[in-house]
Image: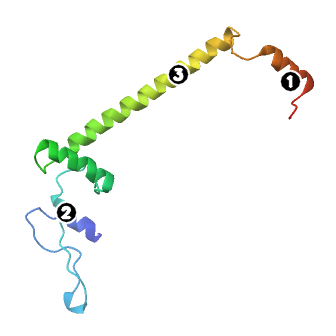
Amino acid sequence: MSADARCFERPIADTRDCHSTDPLQGGVRHRCYTERVPTNRRRHAVTETPSVQAALDELRRELGTDRIELGELVVLGADAKLAALRAERAETAALRTRLANRVRSRDTGADIDAADEVRAGGWARR
């Protein structure tokens, strides 16, 4: 059985060390904390890059507190991103429909006589 498997099998109250090596021989003693993780859900780390920090600092000033609910921000941001993507898709679909209708009605906006001339004589560069 692997050290990780042994670690997960121990009761939470068990405070023995897992994955231990002898500290007298230059090893490091590691404590097993994995059984105390409260969820199986994915976790995310956010680094406050300059742009993230600027946005969060503005929000902190407006809220009057340093405490920010990142989960709420993620949900709001995901909703806004979805709305933007869906609006973009809807706009693209509307443009395609408009173009298809113009082609069907032969109202492409092209100069038919010029196109016929190019077809007959080829491109000429001046």
How far is disc 2 from disc 1 in space, using C-alphas?
79 Å
Residue 90 in sight in this render: yes
User: Looking at the rendering, which quadrant does residue 77 occupy?
Assistant: top left
- Identify the residue position indicated by label 2 in the image: 9
> What's the coloring here?
rainbow
Amino acid carrying mark 2 in the image = Glu
- Identify the residue position indicated by label 1 in the image: 118
Residue at 15%, 65% (x, y): give it. 10
Residue 25 picture location, percent across and down: 24, 91
Residue at 26%, 36% (x, y): give it. 76
- Identify the residue position indicated by label 3 in the image: 93
Foreground mark, 3 or 2, reads 3
Q: Residue furthest front?
A: 126
How far is disc 3 from disc 1 in space, using C-alphas?
32 Å
- Which is more toward the observer, 34 or 79? 79
Looking at marks 3 and 1 on the same chain, the residue that comes earlier in the sequence is marked by 3
Residue 54 picture location, percent across and down: 27, 51
Looking at marks 3 and 2 on the same chain, the residue that comes earlier in the sequence is marked by 2
Element under label 1? helix
Element under label 2? helix
